[in-house]
Each structure stands twice: as structure tokens, then as C-alpha cells.
Image (tube, helix red, strand yellow):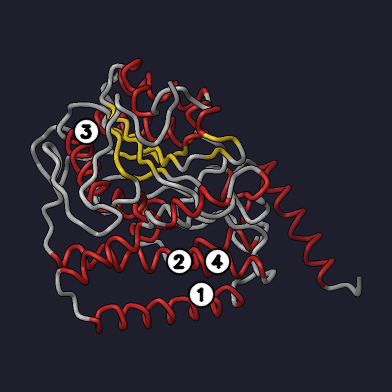
Amino acid sequence: MRASVDHPDAPMIQLLTPRGERVSHPDYAFDGDRTAIEALYRDLVLARRIDTEAFALQRHGELGLWPPALGQEAAQIGSSRALRPQDFAFPTYRDHGVAYCRGVPPIDLLGVFRGTDLGGWDPADHGIALPQIIIGAQTLHATGYAMGLTLDHSVGTGDPERDSATIAYFGDGATSQGDVNEALDWAAVYHAPVVFFCENNQYAISEPLERQTVVPIARRADGFGLPGVRVDGNDVLAVHAATSAALQRARTGEGPTLIEAVTYRMGPHTTSDDPTRYRDGAETEQWKAKDPLDRVRLLLVAEGTAESFFDDLDAEAEALGAALRKECAALPEPDLARLFENVHAEMTDELREQQAAYVAWRDAYEGSDA
């Protein structure tokens, strides 16, 4: 038994087909109107523009590296728009759409990859942690944070402005990491209000899904005693519906859920990767027909959205791209002395001496002819 996209033991939730047709599901529904769908489409378009602009900036030597999210926009937008302000997200290094939806300025995504920023943003300001480079580590962080929410009596109170949950994003390859399995176990045992959101993009760098698992990832939830849900990760409506239900389940004290969003990484793992070395171009072409943006546009056109909406959105995306190019070039060089404050909550006398020694060396070096 292989963990293929279509699996009889793990049917996918779908509310919008690749042809832009609405379909029903017995357990999940998207209850937003056309205006809400237009808002999601705007998110999809702008998130893609941020991603493609950053990719181009890297190719022009303006960024050292970039992990593209092309093709995974619906999984990120649909899930993150299900979050409430008091919820907290723990992303990977590829979840640019999640950061965008949590209000992180797009330029803050670029600083780390340009090497001019020592962190990115203050997580408390946006309800989202900094991008996690260590594969799967954020699942433990999300579980611990969720356990803290329970201790803080921020779960199951019945107050929609207080009850909270966390969401941990990770890829299919991360499910082979011990951290992820430990997090699933702890979350289940302690009934933590956390949603584990797996963006199954079919490849862990160059390793295909069948080298990670022989059953659908959602089925792994059975072994930990928690619900597993499989959703069409290119269907923003279905992702939103499934994530909304899982988050609400967590907020009300019913425990964690594992969501497998079946999607596809259209580009390379990072800009240093060449996907043509390990996958067939015909496969990529098949997934292009399932593009998450195209199906929403087809739906909106069929439902009567004016052409001016799309024209205005295209202009907004162009302006966003131009702004990113300008802001990227203007990013200031980092003050490496800040590393001490960023790493240590409390500075010891020895650390202050080390910081002062570095500053003295830096100032002397910058004042020399060297």
C-alpha cells in the first residue's frame, strides 16, 4: 500500500475542484460569501507575488537563499485565515503566506535571507513565531505553548475572545523526524490545543513521499490516538473549512488534530536545489492543472466577479513587487553587537565584557584603513 494522492482509506476533503466548481462535503463546508472568496483570492495572489519576487531577487544576487512556496498558497492561506488573533502559529521557513496573513510586513521575510536581519520580527506582535530552520522542531514548540494555554485557562472557557489554540506547520519529510512524533505523542497525552498542519508537497528535498511513509500521513494520527484529516491542499475553501473545525475543536478543549494538506511544491526545495534531477517534468505539468489560484479565479468569474477586480488586484501585486525590490535594496546592515541581546535574556558581566570587546574591535576596525 503506497501513500498516493488518491487513497481509498483516506479520502480527501474537497469543496472546489480544479475546474472551479463548488462541490459539497457531508462534514465540512465553507460558509463565506463571494466577498469572502474574493478576499481569499487576493491573499493567494499577493502571497504568490511575495514569493516569486523574492525568488527573482535571489536570482539577481539580492538574497543569499530563498525557499519557494509556489503551489502551496492555498494550504497556507486557507489555514492561516482560520486563525483568530489570540491563536499562535509556528511556521517553517517556507510559510511565507502564513506570515503574510498574520500581518508580518513582507520585507521582514527577506531580511534573514539577505543576511541583514538577526531575527525577523517580534513574534508577540503578530502571533507567529520566527521561521524554523530545524526540521520539525516547531511542533514541539507549538505543543509546549498549547500546554501553557491550558494552564493559563485559555481553553474551553466558552469565551471566543479568550479560548486559544496553536498551529504547527511542517512538511511531509518532517514526519520522519523524532521531534514531530514526540510532539504528536505529548499533545495527545496532555490533550493540548494544537493543530498539526502537514503541507504534504510530495517531496522532502529530493526524497519522494513513498520514501517517507507507506500510508497517508493523516493515517498516522491513529497511532497517537488523535483525529487525522486529509484535505485537498490546493483547495483554499476546503483547507479553511478543515482548519477552522480543527482549531475550534482545540479551543473548546477537545484536543489536537493532525491535518494532511495534499499539495505540491512546484519549484525547487530552495534556490540552491535543482528538482529536475529527481522528478519528472510530466508530474509537474499534471500538478499545474491543479493550481490553487486558477480554480478560485474560475469560480469567481463564473459567479460574476467584475473584471475590474482582477485588474485592480494585478496592479496591487505589481506595486507590491516594486515596493519589495526597493525595500530589499534599502535593508540596513545588522549591528552584530545585538546578537548578545537577541540570544541572552539576561546578560552576565562576562557577556557584557565580550560585547564591549567586540564593539571596541569593530569601531577600531571601521576607523582604520584596512
x, y percent for residue 38: 22, 68
- Find residue 324 and name its label: 1
Q: In which quadrant of the rendered image does the C terminus lie?
A: bottom right
Query: Which comes before the other along the chain, label 3 or label 4?
Result: 4
The residue lying toward the viewer, choosing from 179 and 217, is 217
Give yes or no for contact between labels 2 and 1 (Cβ–Cβ under 8 Å): yes
- Disc 3 marks a residue whose amino acid type is Ala
- Disc 4 marks a residue whose amino acid type is Ala
x, y percent for residue 249: 18, 33
The crowd level at tag 1 (other Cα within 10 Å; few <14, some 14-19, many 20+) is many
Query: Which comes before the other along the chain, label 2 or label 1?
Result: 2
Give yes or no for contact between labels 2 and 4 (Cβ–Cβ under 8 Å): no
* Residue 94 drawn above or below residue 163: below
x, y percent for residue 208: 55, 35
The residue that disc 4 covers is: 54
The residue that disc 2 covers is: 106
Count of labels in the image: 4
Give yes or no for contact between labels 3 and 1 (Cβ–Cβ under 8 Å): no
The residue lying toward the viewer, choosing from 323 and 117, is 323
Using the rendered view, name the quadrant where residue 9 is placed: top left
Measured in 3D between alpha carbons, the distance from the residue under mark 2 to the one under mark 1, in whole angstroms, is: 7 Å
The residue that disc 3 covers is: 250
* Residue 115 drawn above or below residue 4: below
